[in-house]
Image (cartoon, grey):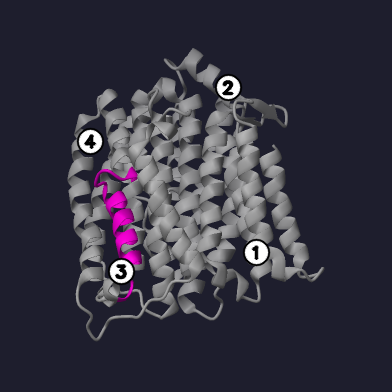
Amino acid sequence: MNILIALTIIGVIAMLSEILRFRKVLYPLALTGLAAGLVLCAMEWGSNIRYFHDMMFMDNYAIAFSMVLIGTTFIWFLLNPAYLRNHEHEADYTALISFSLAGAVVMVSFADLTMLFLGIEILSIAMYIMAASNKMELRSNESGFKYFMLGAFATGFLLFGIALVYGVTGTFNLQELAGFVSANKVNLPAMFYGGLLLMIVGLAFKISAAPFHFWAPDVYEGAPTPVTAYMATVVKTAAFAAFLRLFMTCFSGIADWWAPMLAIFSAISMLAGNILAVYQKSLKRMLAYSSISHAGYMLMAIVAMNQNSDGALLLYTAAYAIGSLSIFTLLVSMTTNGNEMINSLRGFSSVNKIPAILITITMLSLAGIPPVAGFFAKYYVFLSAIESGYTWLVLVGVLSSLIGVYYYFRIIIAMFQPADRESTQIQFSNSQNAVLWLTVILSLILGFMPGFLTGSI
């Protein structure tokens, strides 16, 4: 609860900064507030307190994912000082990010379907605005419009599914839902399964899992690059944590009905995302398809639905967010020069030797190469799936990972090739260099000590 209050206060302070004329200190205040949020998370560890008449539950699962979300947002702020501080709407952007983060925390700590819906909407509305925030850019307007229309469409599916489930069970509370499913799993009515199917479709849209992924490449490409970085990390982490919490708490007793469906979504996402990423010439669009493939890997943890699922998903979301922020550091610097093409990276290492090495390490993490965090994230997800009997899905995951290695190495090879006419001179600020070092250090720490996360919840 204190975490949610702290994040809301940051947003309120940001809105007041223009009126009270302290916008110049807003950026350090936001970083301080996020650091305080991490401290509050640590202080609440093990408390297991329920709030709002059992509508929110701050257990270790919620706190661990909240720490990942807040830590990722902290690094995001370090990555984008120019985007925030040099913009006339810095206060608005800071407030929107803070409120969206509060929505994300609600999504990982809900104990009632009403709070799940509220958390999704608080997060989504802020992201609709941020995606279309570059009003002078046609692609940004298109991105915001597509995100809003398809997001609202997906929300309709989710809300209609919740209504049908409520009509059968008479409750929004997760524990009561779980008790109802456990007591009646042999003779649940068709309306219940229809509602559950609609909820799966709505959540699949939110996590950009195939075949509900078509919005992601266009929205990711059109949105301002810092906003894309936030969507690909914080938004995806919150959506998957909410997805797993809902199904692990309420619907694990009927996993035989929904798990094969999600396994198919997972396989299609891994294959389609990786194969289509191979053909992309734009780094930003390639990362969009890469995010779809990673959604497939993370879905495996939900499909497995065993005692290792939550820890595997926590490690994977953390490793993916860390690796993605490193690559988006490169992409933010590229788009400053008006170029997002992979070929423009030729000669990058000759001018930026240390950053090239650091980015290579995080690329290896995203590709799943040992000993960095991404390898062990995939290992624990695959292990969880094998333990639940989904060996065929793991084989699909291994095959798609081999495809993924190809396009990640395309970027690495481009960085270390000699420069040509298409090459772009890229410069990093001090804070962006700090992000590169921080992401590499975290990737290596989690690579050598993955049990620090997998065994925490």
Disc 1 or 3, which lies upstream in sequence? 1
Main SS of residues in magenta: helix
Mark 1 and 3 residues: CB-CB less than 8 Å, in contact?
Answer: no
Relative side of 158 to 351, left or right:
right
**Where does the image place residue 260, in percent across and percent down from the top left?**
30, 32
Disc 2 or 1, which lies upstream in sequence? 1
Closest to the camera, between mark 4 and mark 2, is: 4
Q: Which residue is mark 3?
A: 353
- Cα–Cα gap, marks 4 and 3: 36 Å
- Cα–Cα gap, marks 1 and 4: 44 Å
In depth, the one of 117 and 400 nearer the eye is: 400
Mark 1 and 4 residues: CB-CB less than 8 Å, in contact?
Answer: no
- Cα–Cα gap, marks 2 and 3: 54 Å
Q: Which residues are magenta?
A: 351-373
Disc 4 or 2, which lies upstream in sequence? 2
- Cα–Cα gap, marks 4 and 2: 31 Å
Three-letter amino acid code of the residue under disc 1? Tyr
SS at badge 2: helix
Disc 2 or 3, which lies upstream in sequence? 2
Three-letter amino acid code of the residue under disc 4? Val
**Where does the image place residue 280, in percent across and percent down from the top left?**
26, 67
The residue lying at 33 percent from left, 48 percent from top is 294
Relative side of 394 to 25, left or right:
left
Closest to the camera, between mark 4 and mark 3, is: 3
Mark 4 and 3 residues: CB-CB less than 8 Å, in contact?
Answer: no
